[in-house]
Image: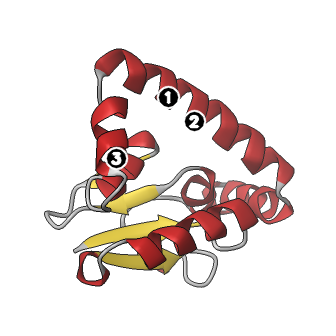
Amino acid sequence: MITVFYDGKCSLCYSEIEYYKRTGPEAVFEWVDITVDSSIIQKLGITYADGLKILHAQDSNGKLHMGVDAFLLIWRKIPGWRLLAIIVDIPIIRLIVDIAYRIFAAWRFKRLAHCQIALKADDVTKN
């Protein structure tokens, strides 16, 4: 079972995950909206803000995958997306996609109010 931790308050994230839910095999994924319950990711050592910033997934062996690695984990299990996973996993393409994703994720995170609130709450918790 692959557990996917996503930002359910982000309309783009929510729509993408809903698409994966409709097209992916049911018995393979557990979908966790961390805006409903963030305690699960916190037990894995992920702050709420970090969980909102980039996609996280945990494979059946308990290994945590983040960002592009999490997408690859998902795409490899969904028919019609496996070829994209193979292409994106080519080292130079993976590097470019990873950089682009991190830039986009940071931009998205700065624009969403609930992400900024989470960031401030995490800062308070750390101090």
CA separation in Å, label 1 and label 3: 11 Å
User: Which amino acid type is shown beneath numbered disc 3?
Assistant: Leu
* Sequence order check, earlier mark of 1 and 3: 3
Q: Where is residue 92 in the image (x, y as percent from the top left)?
A: 37, 15
Please say if the residues under marks 2 and 1 sit with CB atoms less than 8 Å apart. Answer: yes
Residue 58, position in %: x, y? 30, 62
Q: What element carries label 3?
A: helix
**Residue 105 against residue 100 in the figure, above or below:** below
**The quarter of the displayed image where residue 8 is located:** bottom right
* Residue under numbered circle 3: 72
Q: In the rendered structure, which amino acid carries the disc numbered 2? A: Tyr
| Neighbourhood count class around disc 3 (C-alpha, 10 Å): few under 14, some 14–19, many 20 upward | many
Q: Is residue 44 visible?
A: yes
Q: Are marks 1 and 3 in contact (CB under 8 Å)?
A: no
Residue linked to disc 2: 101
Judging by the rendered image, the residue that carries numbered circle 1 is 97
